[in-house]
Amino acid sequence: MSCTDKKHDLRATLVSATGIGLMALLTGCSDSPRVPVAGSAASSASANASNSAQEPGPARPQPPASGPKTGAALPAPKPPRTHDELRLQAAHRLIAANPQHSYTGTVPEILLAIPVLEVNLNRDGSIKSIVVLRRPSQELGTVKLAIDALHRAAPYGDLSRLPGPWKFTETFLFNDERRFKPRSLD
């Protein structure tokens, strides 16, 4: 590989990483309840191609629950002023912390599974407990995927100024690729 090719590859990698970081930053800072649809058809086509290469079935390797697969830490959450703001901030953090396991586009008409979880939080925004309110009759593994995603997105901000109880409910809309979209963003 020539020196020029190496510079081109490095430049393309830096541009791509900068764009992804900027999108994550803007999504996390938005007061809007809507999440923009994924950038381009090329990016969603490459995401679909990488997902179709995986074998279907319940036994899929999961990333560690310590943080996003990219190794980048999530920005510190701002203290929510209302319970609705807490729920929306949590949904945005779920997407940012789980880019390989989530989607932001249109929800398909037929979903693979729809688990519903209630997340009880401590004063500092860490997870106190998670209660499964609705367990899908098929694809039971999606409940664990949703719980792991919630842990990767924690903490959810300083809740000391918010009246208790400190909890929110999230519905996870799983598509056929076992990727979820929080119902709060739909």
Image: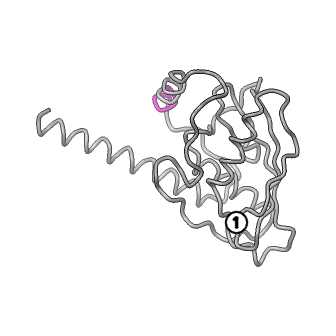
Where residue 34 appears, x then y in whole percent?
Answer: 68, 48
Q: Residue at x 58, y 39 (%)?
A: 62
Task: Name the one closer to the observer, 15 or 159.
Answer: 159
Query: Which residue lies most toward the front here?
Result: 59
User: Please, which colouring scheme is shown?
Assistant: one colour
Q: Is residue 22 left or right of residue 168?
A: left
Q: Which residue type carries mark 1? A: Ser
Task: Name the one closer to the observer, 167 or 60.
Answer: 60
Where residue 173 appears, x then y in whole percent?
Answer: 74, 36
Q: Residue at x 68, y 37 (%)?
A: 180
Query: Which residue lies most toward the bottom here?
Result: 161
Q: Residue at x 56, y 21 (%)?
A: 55
Picture layout, residue 143 above or below residue 152: above
Q: Is residue 120 left or right of residue 13?
A: right
Where residue 99 appears, x then y in whole percent?
Answer: 56, 43
- Quarter of the image for the N terminus: give it: top left
Give, as a single range, the part of the protein colored magenta.
Answer: 41-45
Picture layout, residue 157 above or below residue 103: below
Magenta-colored stretch includes residue 116: no
Q: Is residue 133 left or right of residue 126?
A: right
Task: Name the one closer to the observer, 174 or 34.
Answer: 174
Q: Secondary structure at mark 1?
A: loop
User: What secondary structure characterizes most of the magenta part?
Assistant: helix
Q: Residue at x 52, y 57 (%)?
A: 25
- Quarter of the image for the C terminus: give it: top right
Q: Which residue is mark 1?
A: 126
